[in-house]
Image (cartoon, coloured by chain):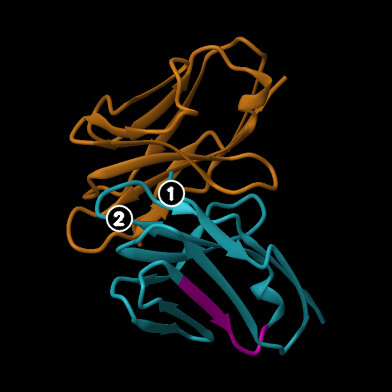
Amino acid sequence: GQQLNQSPQSMFIQEGEDVSMNCTSSSIFNTWLWYKQDPGEGPVLLIALYKAGELTSNGRLTAQFGITRKDSFLNISASIPSDVGIYFCAGRRGAQKLVFGQGTRLTINP
Amino acid sequence: EPEVTQTPSHQVTQMGQEVILRCVPISNHLYFYWYRQILGQKVEFLVSFYNNEISEKSEIFDDQFSVERPDGSNFTLKIRSTKLEDSAMYFCASVRPTGLAEAFFGQGTRLTVV
């Protein structure tokens, strides 16, 4: 089946540092989505990517849809305490199910 | 802003009992999904629903599970005879009808089977 490999699994950084995480797949996706999940909450959409090579920003967040359509990365610049949480990538082909990565748990030391 | 709502937020049930988890998707959305997340693990696909029928289901979604959209607004997930390993967060999601493929998630129902 379709699998997404997300890395790193966890990150421990200092406030103010930049963060980078990525997802790779053996399958091609037409859409890449990045979600953030706070404890006890549902995933909240951060950025959606629809075209290979697309680079999209949302405030301090930047994400790119890989040229091969098999990977995507998310960068967070100048991290702040509220960035703490679990970040998930997700991929979709057409109207098929959204497939999630394993998540990256971000911890920030003040 | 429209959102997906789920009830209850927390359900505790005895093993072997039936549970129904409820979702109200965003009103003009047409694709609906149930996902589950065992504590500390990734979000796993259970089932997708379109045009009043299941369009895709995972191997997790066995005969003990069923979904229904009884009245055009609610979308329910039923587990007939719960097992301990069904304990998880269950998320409902909906996708708007055209163009963009973004899925919007509810807050989840935490199911605890004892």
Stretch of the chain drawn in magenta:
A72-79
Left or right of B43 in this view: B106 = left
x and y, in percent, of residue B79 in the image: 49, 19
Q: Residue at x 41, y 66 (%)?
A: A70
Q: Chain of mark 1?
A: A
Question: What kind of residue is marked 2?
Answer: Arg
Amino acid at circle 1: Gln
User: Could you tell whether B112 is left or right of B36 in the image?
Assistant: right
Please, what is the dominant secondary structure of the magenta stretch?
Answer: strand
- In this rendering, would B21 be left or right of A78? left
**Residue A75 painted magenta:** yes
Q: Is residue A89 left or right of residue A93?
A: right
Going 35% across and 78% down the picture, which residue do you hit? A67
The residue nearer to you, when weighing A24 against B44, is A24
Instruction: Tell me the quarter of the image containing the C terminus of chain B.
Output: top right
In the rendered image of this protein, which colour is used for chain A? cyan
Q: Quadrant of residue A29?
A: bottom left
Q: Position of residue A95 (x, y in %)?
A: 25, 50
Element under disc 2: loop
Frontmost residue, B39 versus A4: A4
Q: Nearer the viewer, residue B103 or A25?
A: A25
Determine whether A110 is above or below B62 in the image: below
Q: Quadrant of the N terminus of chain B?
A: bottom left
Q: Are marks 1 and 2 in contact (CB under 8 Å)?
A: yes
Q: Colour of chain B?
A: orange
Residue A93, disc: 2
What residue did someone put label 1 on?
Answer: A2
